[in-house]
Image (tube, rainbow, N blue to C red):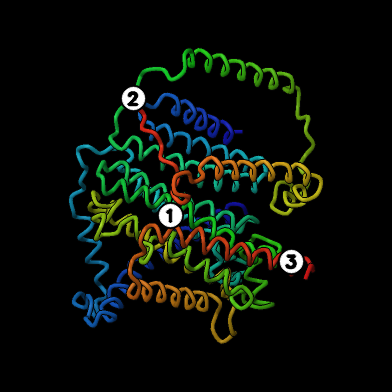
């Protein structure tokens, strides 16, 4: 319980940092912190494979790509522009956050009477158990997700296909702003 | 009993960090002396017998240098970056089994700090975090060369990590476990994987060299183009931390290659297992240095082409073949 509270505070602080930080690279760093605390949550829940996958995929690959783009674009370390991207995005995001918070609180109150989950079977969440689940009863979902990702990858290739001489990618128009 | 195991773990952590730090210092000396011999000169041989006290002199020098902070730099991230790099480098070694479990005063002590079922995934998780040190250092320095170095390192890591992951899948299929101790035991009782997985071993070794940013893959620091890249602006102890991370990464990569493909601590019984492990790791470190003294640096586009068009397909085809063999389809 103590570990949970410490982790929750860290995770919450990192999440607030993502929106509150003025420099995009700092936001990305807070997001990495948040991702890593989530991985430790998974570890506490006996899901060691999920924890490793979380770090490898999110912290190790996706956030590296994020940082790649952010460091390139904000090389001069200017402060983020204060103007809003979408009209009313702050109000909308606030509304969504409050709704999600209320829903989560509702779940917490509803199940506060006591543990309604069964204790873990031995080996639950380990790599072999995950493998048996994914390639056994969960295989249909796995196949659908694989198909979806393949489609997305092909779409990227099609959208970036060569236009001018058949070898080079099409030139991106200069943004007038 | 719990207290005892906690104490044992703490002692093991301190020992491991001590060994790795000493290993870093003497790997560096070995590299400088060997490079000297490769280039028909002597290398550092003045401090102590055969230059053996050179690391001590270097340490004193590094610790007494001024700790510079560029005026345009982001102070927090600038100071954080070398810590991240060194932490990730040290953390990976926690799961590598350095020897067979030893029996001491009626206790069985395994020669790794932790032995999780997801050992191999743990290694990949922490080795992929090491790149943050480089990227953040490059960005926080606010120097165009540093930034280019950081950007290069992230692109390089993303490209080569994939091939590295694919190259060890064959071992997972054959052993049926990601636990490093189980993988070593399997090799001790059956065969070393370097004999059945030759191509994956070569892919793994190449990608490991790329992930440790060693020549010929040292594009993030490329002193002739980028003026040392991501660590241009660093001095004193923070500069030394980047060097520690690089050399400890080299030791780790050697240790992983030995664990996965060369039977870990297994060997003939006239030497204790830990000595076999250290001998094999030493041989790998020598090969790393040898390659550095032999090959020129890759050009950037060739690095990317090599990673995506040669290493990934090679590793992938071999995984398919291993899977087909293991499932009895062939």
Query: Do marks 3 and 2 share a subunit?
Result: no
Name above or below for residue A57 compared with residue B167.
above
Name above or below for residue B260 compared with residue A87.
below
Q: Residue at x 42, y 31 (%)?
A: A27
Which label was assigned to residue B156? 1
Is B126 left or right of A68, judged from the image as shown? right
x, y percent for residue B228 = 26, 56
Q: Give the mark toward the camera: 3 or 2.
A: 2
Question: Helix, strand or loop at disc 3?
Answer: helix
Which label was assigned to residue A177? 2
Question: Helix, strand or loop at disc 1?
Answer: helix
- Say whether marks 1 and 3 touch (CB < 8 Å): no
Q: Give the mark toward the camera: 2 or 1.
A: 2
Which chain's residue wears label 3?
A: B
Name above or below for residue B115 compared with residue A140.
below
User: Dot 3, how many residues are within 10 Å of its Cα: few (below 14), some (14-19), or many (20+)?
Assistant: few
Residue B320 in view (yes/no): yes
In the image, B175 versus A170, the foreground residue is: A170
In the image, A154 versus B147, the foreground residue is: A154
The residue under label 3 is: B324
């Amino acid at each position: 319980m103590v570990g949970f509270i410490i982790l929750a505070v860290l995770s919450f602080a990192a999440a607030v940092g993502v929106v509150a930080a003025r420099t995009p690279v700092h936001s990305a760093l807070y997001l990495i912190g948040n991702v890593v605390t989530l991985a430790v949550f998974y570890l506490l829940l006996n899901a060691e494979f999920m924890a490793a996958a979380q770090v490898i995929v999110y912290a190790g690959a996706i956030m590296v790509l994020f940082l790649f783009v952010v460091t390139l674009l904000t090389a001069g370390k200017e402060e983020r522009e204060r103007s809003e991207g979408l009209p009313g995005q702050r109000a909308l995001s606030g509304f969504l956050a409050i709704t999600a918070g209320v829903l989560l609180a509702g779940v917490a109150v509803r199940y506060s009477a006591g543990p309604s989950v069964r204790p873990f079977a031995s080996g639950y969440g380990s790599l072999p158990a995950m493998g048996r689940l994914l390639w056994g009863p969960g295989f249909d979902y796995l196949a659908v997700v694989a198909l979806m990702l393949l489609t997305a990858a092909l779409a990227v290739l099609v959208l970036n296909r060569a236009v001018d001489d058949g070898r080079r990618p099409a030139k991106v128009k200069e943004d007038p702003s | 009993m719990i207290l005892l195991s906690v104490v044992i773990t703490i002692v093991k952590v301190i020992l491991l960090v001590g060994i790795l730090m000493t290993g870093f210092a003497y790997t560096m000396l070995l590299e400088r002396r060997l490079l000297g011999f490769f280039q028909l000169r002597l290398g550092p041989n003045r401090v102590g017998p055969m230059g053996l006290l050179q690391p001590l002199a270097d340490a004193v020098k590094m610790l007494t240098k001024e700790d510079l902070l560029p005026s345009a730099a982001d102070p927090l991230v600038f100071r954080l970056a070398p810590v991240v790099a060194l932490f990730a480098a040290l953390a990976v070694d926690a799961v590598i089994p350095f020897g067979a479990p030893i029996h001491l005063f009626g206790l069985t002590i395994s020669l790794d700090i932790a032995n999780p079922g997801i050992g191999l995934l743990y290694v990949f998780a922490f080795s992929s975090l090491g790149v943050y040190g480089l990227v953040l250092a490059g960005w926080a320095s606010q120097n165009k060369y540093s930034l280019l170095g950081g950007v290069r390192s992230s692109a390089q890591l993303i490209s080569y990590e994939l091939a590295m992951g694919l190259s060890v899948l064959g071992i997972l299929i054959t052993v049926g476990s990601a636990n490093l101790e189980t993988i070593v035991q399997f090799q001790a009782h059956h065969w070393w994987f370097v004999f059945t997985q030759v191509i994956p071993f070569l892919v793994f070794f190449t990608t490991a060299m790329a992930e440790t940013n060693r020549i010929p893959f040292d594009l993030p620091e490329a002193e002739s183009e980028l003026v040392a890249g991501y660590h241009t602006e660093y001095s004193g102890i923070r500069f030394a931390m980047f060097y520690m991370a690089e050399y400890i990464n080299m030791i780790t990569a050697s240790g992983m290659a030995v664990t996965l493909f060369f039977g870990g601590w297994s060997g003939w019984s006239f030497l204790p297992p830990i000595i076999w492990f250290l001998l094999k790791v030493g041989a790998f470190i020598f090969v790393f240095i040898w390659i550095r003294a032999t090959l020129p640096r890759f050009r950037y586009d060739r690095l990317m082409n090599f990673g995506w068009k040669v290493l990934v397909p090679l590793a992938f085809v071999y995984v398919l073949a291993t899977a087909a063999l293991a499932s009895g389809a062939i």
